[in-house]
Image (tube, rainbow, N blue to C red):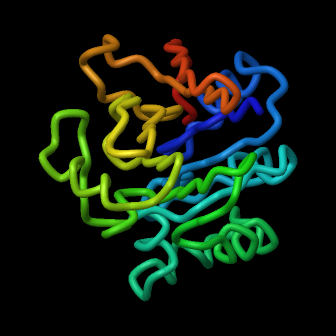
Amino acid sequence: MRIGIVSDIHCNVDGLRTALERMGDVDELLCAGDTIFEYRFNNEVVELLRERGARIILGNHEAVLYGPQGARARAASHVHKDSLDYLGSMPWLIDVDVGGERLILAHGSPVDPFNEYIFPDSPALQRLSDIDAGYIILGHTHHQMAVRVGRALVVNPGSAGDARDLRNGRRLSYAILDTSSGEVTFDDYDATPSP
């Protein structure tokens, strides 16, 4: 199975479009949260992910928008209610079986979806070895990672909208997970940020 993974789009529809075009056909598309940017909502990002049948989880930026402090932003005239409701119906964590392996999709970590930043060299990474899963997919840090921890392959695709990883020259990125081989490939690219 070929799984496309995006995360931390932060309203950058051009970055997302480029990722989806470059990854081509995938068996499954996962989005590890932060489709939006705090008080900004982008209908096109949500609608594009919805059209592609992506499994989406909510991140810390969605927590801001859908919290009490986001009421004014949610009521903005440009926001499509259908898209807002659709994104708001997404879970904070996904735990599914993929090809006989347990896959957990969380924004920060399965332990703390919003506040924990797990970088490739974080000591907290080792805590994930206690989780009985084949794959743990994370976002939040905007830093690429494919590290085996215990039984799990922990993957962070980087960011398809707000590049921050100095290791890839602060370029946007996504990942492809091939569950047959266990191989993860990253694709780094440049894209014009959305206005």
Q: Nearer the viewer, residue 1 or 142?
A: 1
Residue 177, image x, y percentages: 61, 30
* Residue 154 image offset from top left, x and y in percent: 41, 41
* Relative height, residue 76 to residue 37 (above, below): below
Q: Is residue 22 left or right of residue 65?
A: right
Compared with 165, 49 (above or below) is: below
Q: Is residue 124 left or right of residue 57?
A: left
Is the C terminus in the top left, top right, bottom left or bottom right quadrant? top right
| Residue placed most toward the observer, 56 or 120 | 120
Hey, which quadrant is residue 165 in on the image? top left
Could you tell me how many numbered marks the image carries?
A: 0
Residue at left 50%, top 23%?
Answer: 173
Residue 132 location, x and y as percent? 45, 60
Query: Which sits in the foreground, 133 or 6?
Result: 133
Q: Image quarter for residue 6?
A: top right
User: Which residue occupies 36% across, 49% down?
Assistant: 140
| Residue 101 x/y as whole percent | 64, 50
> Would you place residue 74 above or below residue 154 in this image?
below
Q: Along the horizontal axis of the image, is 64 left or right of 193?
A: left
Q: Residue at x 39, y 61 (%)?
A: 131
Please give left or right for residue 195 compared with residue 14 in the image: left
Q: As drawn, which residue projects farthest toward the bottom? A: 68
Identify the image quadrant of the N terminus.
top right
